[in-house]
Amino acid sequence: MAKDVLCEVNNCTYWGDGNQCHADAIYVVSRKGDKASTSEETDCKTFEPGI
Ligand code: SF4
């Protein structure tokens, strides 16, 4: 289980100082079905656009 999630997407509702993700849990999906070959093929589905 991931304890500290760091993220650069600073317009997400769950983003905080120090690139900390403050969501209780995150859900990561693949852009290519249920497998990925590189990290670029993955996305955080928990993302919520902030203000
Ligand atoms: S929910 Fe996803 S996109 Fe939003 S801060 Fe956390 S890891 Fe980043």
Image (cartoon, grey):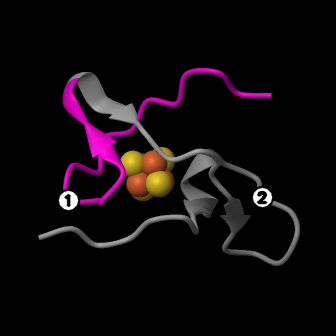
As shown in the figure, which amino acid type bears the numbered disc 1?
Asn
As shown in the figure, which amino acid type bears the numbered disc 2?
Ala
Depth check: give the residue in front, 4 or 34. Answer: 4
Q: Which residue is mark 2?
A: 36
**In x, y percent, where is residue 42?**
62, 59
**In x, y percent, where is residue 49?**
28, 72
Residue lying at 43% horizontally and 39% vertically, measured from the top left: 22
Q: Count neighbours of disc 2 (C-alpha within 10 A) and say few if under 14, some if 14 to 19, many if 20 or more.
A: few
Q: What is the total number of numbered labels drawn onto the structure image? A: 2
Instruction: Name the mark on residue 19.
Output: none
Q: Quadrant of the N terminus?
A: top right
Residue lying at 29% horizontally and 30% vertically, measured from the top left: 19
On whether ligand 1 comes within 8 Å of the CB at mark 1, the answer is: no
Locate residue 8 relative to residue 7 in the image: left or right: left
Identify the residue at the far right of this view: 34
Magenta stretch encompasses residue 6: yes
Q: Quadrant of the C terminus?
A: bottom left
Depth check: give the residue in front, 7 or 14. Answer: 14
Locate residue 21 relative to residue 37 in the image: left or right: left
Depth check: give the residue in front, 22 or 29. Answer: 22
Identify the residue at the far left of this view: 51
- Which label sits in the foreground, 2 or 1? 1
Q: Which residues are magenta?
A: 1-17
**In x, y percent, where is residue 24?**
59, 45
Q: Count neighbours of disc 1 (C-alpha within 10 A) and say few if under 14, some if 14 to 19, many if 20 or more.
A: few
Locate residue 12 relative to residue 44 in the image: left or right: left
Q: Which residue is mark 1?
A: 11
Identify the residue at the far front of this view: 24
Q: Main secondary structure of the magenta part?
A: loop
Magenta stretch encompasses residue 16: yes
